[in-house]
Image (cartoon, rainbow, N blue to C red):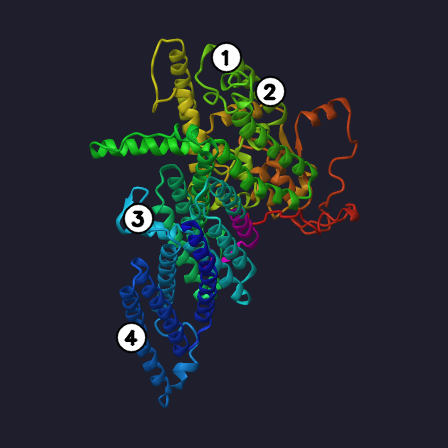
Amino acid sequence: MEGRLAMSHELLLWPLALAMALGTAGLVKWAADARTRVGAGVVLFLLVMMTAMLLGAAVYALAPSGRTAVLGLWVATALMSVSVFPLFLLILRSAQPGRSGTATSLAPPWGPFWPYVGSVVGLVLANELLMGWVFQLASGTPVTWSEGGVGGLSGMLAQIVDGPWFLFTMATEMAVTTALLWGRLSPPIRTVLLLQAGIMLLSPPALAGATWTAISIYAASGLMTVLFVYLMEYAYRTRQLALGFSAYIVRLLGVYALMMAGLFLWLVYGNSLAFAVAVLLEMVLFFDAVVRPDRLEAGDRVPWQLRPHWAFALLAGVFVSELFMGALLDAQIAGATFVGNLPAAPLSGTPLRIALDALYNGFWFIALVSISAWFLVMMGLEMGALVVLKIRETTRTELKLRLGIMLAAFWLFTVYFPSFWSTVPLVSATALSQVPVLGWGMGLGTGGPLAPAVFGAILVTYVLIGSASFLFGRRVLCSVLCNAPTMYQGTLVDAMGSFNRSSPIGRKYLGSRLSTTYSVTTGAVLVALVGSSVVSYLDAVGRLNVLVAGADPTVFLSTFSFGVLWYLMFVTIPYTGNYNCVTMGWCHWGTFSQLFSRFGFFRLKVKSREVCKACTTLDCAKSCPVGLVDMPGHFRTKGEFRSSKCCGVGDCVGACPYGNLEFHDVRHWIRARFGTGSKRARGSPLPMVSARARPGRLTTEGADPAAGVLSSAAPGAGLGR
């Protein structure tokens, strides 16, 4: 009987909640359109009236009785009566002779702008909290002073915000408000706001039950990934962002980072306070923007490639959000298996002890999540989508094929084999560690301790990678097999190659010359690799018992390098330059590959040195993701270029406006040696330097007119570089 009564109450409450959400959205639209003091005053008065009614209802809902009904009515009436006087005085003042202009003709921002916006947002927030509280009580769900270990007002706030009456109503208001302001919002802003509403609607704490929790976590994670891909692609396509919208983007990413952390804490530890705080912050951010939507398009349009701090905030916000999203998915899918592996050093004792334990917990949390299956799946979907968009815009078949192989390698060698293949019956992690390349894809450490049983797999791994690097260049590893190229070669991050030349640190590593800093970095990495390998081997044979942060030395080194340091370098691209794992020399696996590449067959060749001598664009150097700015000089003098830093991405080949560059590796050597392949003469068709032309000027004399090599550069050549 009580269950039927509660259900009937909810059937009555939901239409009322929908009506209030529509009413609030309409008032926000009115607030955004207000252009006079009187119009703004009316909006504030109506919002205060709504607050007063909800406050009176809350008084009654706390202890339903005739006495509290009267008390609630008095509270609501008193608040409405007080609020009407400022509006009345404002109307009288505007009606005075000579003051009509203040009521009708002031353009925004009028008067005290921030107090007005703050009042609207504050009243909307108060209405939502009161409505969530009242409706939760009316539906028969008590609101206590403790929730998930959080007591007092914080616990009460978490229960209200994390309930369906607040979250679903909030999502409805966000969607309806966006629809009402449709004509005043640009398409990118509409898309972002609607995706926000969808993510809010899919909040896992809103409803109890394992089914809703699982569905909402998967759907919200997918929708948030779509949002991140959209934002990054929008930044790539637009390049010059309005300051208002660019600031909104980084604030939103900060809120989502906190929201994902809050959802993880809620799912694993039952503490929903952080998620509730993130929801309130997103609500403030959203309504602050829509009350004055013109501010999102306001301000100068500044190229983000000249704003490294903004680019860093974008990458950091996306990474932290994805990190906790991956942890959330791991906890939902793997459950106790994943949670049991999380570090749990007690934060007690001296301040130094607490700091060290916190550092230990944080390090292993980041490392365990960043190498976990579902984090890599989410990052693969996100960054892989940007690679697919790059494939769509490039016209070079060879580049399309390499990018496609690169994506396949990511899903096979980074996701499937380490995380899923080893769970197949009859295949274990121990067996995986003895498989060449698969178990040792990043060199020492990833397959486990350096035990004698795995020497064969390690040796074959290095032989295979060394041989492939000798034959085809460093691109085998750094542009295909490693997981880094998928992160680096999507549209947005590829455009961040401009930071190689503009950032103070990136400029130190420009060119093919190995600087002193590069040599020191590489030397330190190799010393760490050799030292940890020796200690690991001695541990395995029982001569030593040395652990680093509780792990085998080579396992720790690999985990630190590819689970923590690599992502730190990724988010600091605006300060260190793109492909900094290559330019700065901290990757031991890449250092090994570059040794064989340096003396192998791979190089870049030009069809005509004369074309390079007359070229003034230098697009090949501008497009290089590792900052090999000295390649034009080599093309002009030698007709070819080879460097141990070159990772064979191929942007330079596509960027050349004359189609003058091409790769050369063992395949081309075989063709030249044995006379196989195309007989086409090198350098034709190409623009040639005319004797009658001024020095340094290219003409089309002697070139095939159908080639059109002067009139059309390769798509995206030098874009944003």
Residue at point 59%, 30% (across, down) = 409
Q: Earlier in the sequence, mark 3 or mark 2?
A: 3
Q: Earlier in the sequence, mark 1 or mark 2?
A: 1
In the rendered image, the residue lying farthest to the left is 350
Q: Is residue 275 above or below residue 68?
A: above
Q: CA distance from mark 1 to mark 2?
A: 18 Å
Q: CA distance from mark 4 to mark 1?
A: 83 Å
Answer yes or no: is residue 684 visible.
yes
Disc sitting over residue 82 in the figure: 4
Q: Is there CB contact under 8 Å for labels 1 and 2?
A: no
Q: Is residue 77 above or below residue 605?
A: below
Label 1: few (<14), some or many (≥20) within 10 Å?
few
Residue at point 59%, 36% (across, down) = 649
Q: CA distance from mark 3 to mark 1?
A: 56 Å
Choose top left, top right, bottom left or bottom right for residue 99.
bottom left
Q: Secondary structure at mark 1?
A: helix
Most foreground residue, 326 or 482: 326
- Find disc 1 in the rendering and name its residue: 455
Name the kind of residue labelled 1 in the image.
Phe
Answer yes or no: is residue 516 visible.
no
Q: Is there CB contact under 8 Å for labels 3 and 1?
A: no
Nearest to the eye among marks 4 and 1: give it.
4
- Prevalent SS, magenta region: helix
- What is the magenta range? 227-246
Q: CA distance from mark 3 to mark 4?
A: 32 Å
Disc sitting over residue 467 in the figure: 2
**Percent x, y of residue 615:** 64, 46
Q: Secondary structure at mark 3?
A: helix
Most foreground residue, 105 or 698: 105
Q: Is there CB contact under 8 Å for labels 3 and 4?
A: no
Nearest to the eye among marks 3 and 2: give it.
3
